[in-house]
Image: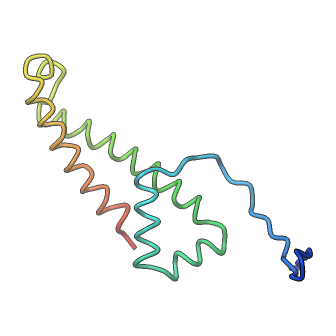
Amino acid sequence: MELTYHWEGDVLIPDLELENGSNYQIGKYGRMRQRYLFENHHAMYTHLVLTEKLWKHLEEVDMECNDMMDMLTVRMAEREGVTEHLKSVDQLGWVRKMNNIRSRAEEVVLHDLIYMD
């Protein structure tokens, strides 16, 4: 690998460029995964940064978490009978049940996808 340099004042600066990545905006779960890796698996985090794979990894984790949240929320709601009819009859009851379902689904997602090694 051959590096080229350019002068900035009295200092030689290497001409480094990152590969073109996607324009995906890393969301909540991707940022949580990044923080977890940085704080608990610093060697893995550093390796991903140096090999330019961190953002792709975070993008994949974020997308997978969002998909899993959607799937789990729908399945749990169906299993527990939380329907549009309940929403029209008892809005506060529906909101209470959906918040409970989302909290439980997020616990599963965090355990299975974010805080895994």
Q: Quadrant of residue 52?
A: bottom right
Q: For this view, does 69 lie left or right of residue 100?
A: right
Between 52 and 117, the one nearer to me in the picture: 52
Relative to 68, does residue 57 appear above or below in the rendering?
below
Q: For this view, does 49 lie left or right of residue 117?
A: right
Residue in view at x 32 percent, y 41 percent: 71
Q: Quadrant of residue 111?
A: bottom left
x, y (%) of residue 102?
23, 44
Relative to 9, does residue 101 appear above or below in the rendering?
above
Residue in view at x 51 percent, y 54 percent: 60
Q: In which quadrant will I find the N terminus?
A: bottom right
Q: For this view, does 65 lie left or right of residue 88?
A: right
Residue in view at x 11 percent, y 22 percent: 86
x, y (%) of residue 28?
41, 52
Relative to 32, does residue 43 appear above or below in the rendering?
below
Q: Residue furthest front?
A: 9
Q: For this view, does 47 lie left or right of residue 80?
A: right
Q: Quadrant of residue 51?
A: bottom right
Relative to 56, does residue 2 appear above or below in the rendering?
below
